[in-house]
Image: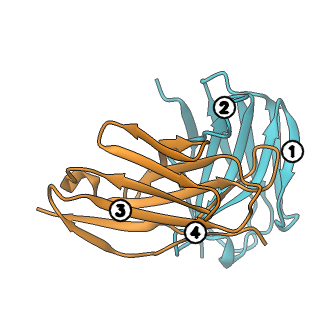
Chain colours: A orange, B cyan
Amino acid sequence: QKEVEQNSGPLSVPEGAIASLNCTYSDRGSQSFFWYRQYSGKSPELIMFIYSNGDKEDGRFTAQLNKASQYVSLLIRDSQPSDSATYLCAVNSGGYQKVTFGTGTKLQVIP
Amino acid sequence: DTAVSQTPKYLVTQMGNDKSIKCEQNLGHDTMYWYKQDSKKFLKIMFSYNNKELIINETVPNRFSPKSPDKAHLNLHINSLELGDSAVYFCASSPPGTGDEQYFGPGTRLTVT
C-alpha cells in the first residue's frame, strides 16, 4: 500500500524561528508533491507544490524534494503564531490524479 | 466568490437515514473529488470524477454513491447511515494538467447518532 508518513507532532517552535516539517513516501514512482495547511475546523489549503528534486521557494516557505531518499520537506522561515496549524503532505502516488495524504504534523508557534 | 462550496455545512442525523451532500465549484476545473476526514484527521480519498466520468472509486461501502450532473457539480448520497460514517466530508476540485493541485470546499461535518 502506498503510504505517506509524517510525524504527528506537535512541533513547537518559538516565533521567528525556522520550522522544519518532514514527510516520507513509499512509492518511488511518485511525481507530484504538495503541502497543505489546515487550520483547526477549516479545510486544507494548498501552500506549496514541487515536482523536481531540489528546493522551491515562495515567500517564507521553501519546499525541498529528494526523490532518491523519498522525502519532501517544508521549511517555514520567520515562523509566526498565525502559522500554527496542521501541515499535510500529499503525494501523487497512484496514477490519474490520485493524491495520498499524510496524517499531518501539528505546528505550534510560540509567541 | 466562493470557489468550492458545499451544502450543508453541518448534518446531524440518525442511524439508518439517507442523506445527501452537495458540492459546486466555479473554478472551471475538470476534476472533482470527495474526501473523508475522520476524528484522527486522516484525509482519505473516496471518489474522483473527471468531466462527469468516475475515475477513482476507492474501497468505499456501496452505501455511498456519488453523482456528477455536470463538471461543476459533484454530489454524495449516503444510504443507511451508520455511526462510523460520522466524519467531515470535503469536496475538492483540480484543474487539468497541473499535477493534481486541489482546492477544497469548507467541509460538511456529518454526525450520525
Residue A42 seen from this side: no
Q: Considering only order in the chain, which callout, 1 or 2, is on the residue closer to the N terminus? A: 1
Badge 2 marks a residue whose secondary structure is: loop
Three-letter residue code for mark 3: Ser
Q: What mark, if any, has residue A20 been given in the picture?
A: 3
Quick check: B84 above or below B103?
below
Residue closest to the eye, B88 or B79 = B88
The mark that comes first in sequence, 2 or 4, is 4
Q: CA distance from mark 2 to mark 4?
A: 24 Å
Q: Chain of mark 1?
A: B
Q: Position of residue B98 (x, y in %)?
A: 66, 31
In front: label 2 or label 4: 2
The front one of B113 and A59 is A59
Q: Is residue B32 left or right of residue A51?
A: right
Q: Which residue is mark 1?
A: B55
The residue wearing badge 2 is: B98
Chain bearing tag 3 is: A
Residue B27 point in image, percent of width and height = 60, 24
Q: Is residue A98 visible?
A: yes
Q: Are marks 4 and 1 in contact (CB under 8 Å)?
A: no
